[in-house]
Image (tube, helix red, strand yellow):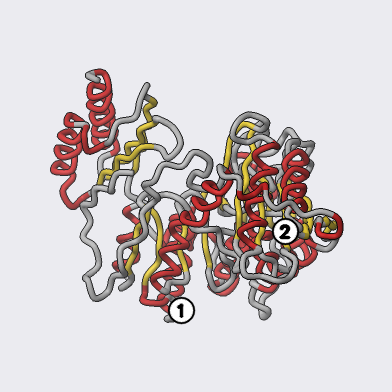
């Protein structure tokens, strides 16, 4: 992945944190930037792979332990969830492990339960915002954090060896599986406890769209039990409608319902509920950057932000960086992916960060992005400030125009070897000066080039993005 081209000055060395971790450079065939993902029942997302992955997880988890390994498994509402849940459980049991099946619950619920129940690992079967025909597998360690790249690479290498096949346990050594009947209830209590006890949602009308996904039961329950007047959308999963014209990918349904119902806020979750898109009372979408701005500025005023710094990715808007700097705060950028945000937060001692896409991480509350917890923090700010969300959002930051152009090519070349592209990037960077920035990177999973340009003139930056894409097209054509 190419390093971002920055035109904004970074915080001074004394104020800034160590460099954020970069994504792995080693070639991996199974794990991507967020676990394993693909079309369900096609390589690599096959039940055979899932069974072997289950064996590998149990094999690694039992090292240095004399007791039986315990692994939680949660999933979203996809039809193929049954396929992989059964296969994963079989693999873990084949290694003598004990499986706790949680059923459909959000990704952050698995992270929280893995930690609170002292399990050795947690597994999430979900493809997040992807269509129902896809599926994926994410792994959490006993501390509730996603496994680092090094451990995922070790598991991948282990799956290619014969170590998992010998010795096999038999008889009483074979593991077992139980259904964790109160998994949803435990997570609902956890979410409610992140909301200030001095506050109540009594009289607050909230539109919640669960995308027919993992939060279809817990999300309405959390806001309702805190007193909210909940209007529930996307809460009738049938195995095939997850993320389909609903949720965080299609907030327009929440927008229309907020306006129609005269609601105070709209909350749109994705399929596994680890990210959220918020809608204000006027029906305007409020993305992750703006949420980070309004929360971080408040934390700065109250001296609740360690090192006066938040962590976000190279995709976050320049307006967020300017808003923080104006308030005496700082921002660290990482590679795209909430796992890299979390890693930088943990290594640098920070407590708040996230992504423009709505992955928001409040490490004082959760170990991963949590859409429900993030929405509760926004509601808390609204109630304590006594202001509508539209006013809070407009005060938080002024967005710099941003364009993103994607282009798919027949092959993927190292960006540093693409001479025409590099020249075009240099020209654009010079034109922008300190009034904007350009970021060019390859997708982590396909030969798709992503060109993002920010600047004051929307027409100009659109032209800059197109110029870089065309230069890349010429570079590829010449090979």
Give coordinates of residue 181: x percent, y percent: 85, 60
Q: Up-down: is 379 above or below 236? A: below
**Distance of mark 2 from mark 1, alpha carbons?**
33 Å
Label 1 environment density (alpha carbons within 10 Å; few <14, some 14–19, many ≥20): some
Q: Which residue is mark 1?
A: 304
Instruction: Identify the residue shown where x is 24% and y is 34%.
Output: 464
In contact (CB < 8 Å): disc 2 and disc 1: no
Q: Nearer the viewer, residue 280 or 58?
A: 58
Asked if residue 325 shows in the view, the reply is yes
Instruction: Identify the residue shown where x is 80% and y is 64%.
Output: 185
Q: Which mark is residue 429?
A: none
Give the farthest residue toward the top: 477
Looking at the image, residue 235 sits to the left or right of residue 139; the answer is right
Secondary structure at badge 2 equals strand
Q: Quadrant of the N terminus?
A: top left
Mark 2 or 1: in front is: 2
Q: Which residue is mark 2?
A: 72
Asked if residue 245 shows in the view, the reply is no
Give coordinates of residue 196: x percent, y percent: 64, 76
Looking at the image, residue 91 sits to the left or right of residue 287; the answer is right
Q: Quadrant of the C terminus?
A: top left
Give coordinates of residue 212: x percent, y percent: 72, 42
Q: Up-down: is 433 above or below 419? A: below
Looking at the image, residue 361 sits to the left or right of residue 417; the answer is right
Q: Nearer the viewer, residue 110 or 65?
A: 65
Give the farthest residue toward the front: 167
């Amino acid at each position: 992945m190419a390093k971002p081209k920055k035109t904004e000055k970074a915080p001074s060395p004394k104020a800034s944190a160590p460099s954020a971790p970069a994504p792995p450079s080693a070639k991996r065939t199974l794990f991507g930037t967020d676990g394993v993902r693909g079309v369900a029942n096609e390589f690599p997302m096959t039940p055979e792979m899932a069974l072997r992955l289950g064996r590998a997880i149990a094999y690694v988890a039992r090292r240095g332990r004399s007791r039986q390994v315990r692994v939680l498994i949660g999933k979203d509402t996809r039809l193929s969830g049954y396929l992989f849940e059964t296969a994963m459980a079989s693999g873990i049991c084949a290694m003598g492990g004990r499986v706790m099946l949680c059923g459909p619950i959000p990704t952050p619920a698995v992270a929280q339960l893995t930690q609170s129940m002292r399990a050795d690992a947690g597994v999430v079967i979900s493809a997040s915002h992807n269509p129902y025909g896809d599926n994926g597998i994410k792994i959490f360690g006993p501390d509730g954090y996603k496994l680092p790249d090094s451990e995922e690479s070790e598991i991948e290498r282990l799956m290619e060896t014969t170590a998992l096949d010998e010795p096999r346990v038999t008889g009483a050594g074979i593991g077992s599986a139980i259904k964790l009947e109160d998994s949803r209830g435990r997570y609902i209590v956890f979410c409610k406890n992140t909301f200030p006890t001095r506050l109540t949602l009594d009289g607050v009308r909230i539109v919640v769209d669960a995308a027919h996904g993992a939060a279809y039961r817990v999300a309405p329950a959390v806001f309702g039990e805190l007193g909210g007047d909940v209007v529930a959308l996307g809460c009738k999963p049938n195995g095939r409608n997850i993320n389909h014209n609903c949720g965080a990918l299609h907030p327009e349904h929440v927008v229309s319902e907020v306006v129609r119902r005269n609601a105070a806020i709209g909350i749109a979750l994705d399929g596994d509920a680890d990210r959220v898109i918020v809608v204000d009372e006027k029906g305007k979408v409020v993305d992750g950057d703006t949420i980070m701005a309004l929360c971080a500025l408040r934390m700065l005023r109250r001296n609740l932000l360690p090192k006066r710094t938040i962590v976000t990715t190279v995709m976050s808007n320049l307006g967020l960086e300017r808003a923080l700097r104006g308030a005496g705060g700082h921002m660290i950028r990482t590679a795209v992916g909430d796992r890299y945000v979390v890693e930088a937060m943990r290594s640098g001692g920070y407590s708040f960060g996230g992504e423009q896409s709505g992955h928001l991480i409040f490490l004082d509350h959760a170990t991963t992005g949590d859409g429900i917890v993030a929405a509760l923090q926004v509601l808390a700010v609204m109630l304590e400030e006594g202001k509508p969300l539209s006013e809070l959002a407009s005060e938080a930051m002024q967005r710099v125009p941003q364009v993103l152009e994607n282009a798919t090519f027949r092959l993927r070349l190292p960006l540093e070897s693409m001479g025409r592209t590099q020249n075009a990037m240099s020209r654009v960077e010079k034109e922008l000066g300190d009034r904007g920035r350009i970021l060019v990177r390859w997708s982590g999973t396909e030969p798709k080039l992503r060109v993002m340009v920010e600047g004051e003139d929307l027409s100009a930056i659109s032209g800059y993005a197109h110029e870089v894409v065309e230069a890349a097209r010429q570079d590829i054509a010449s090979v």
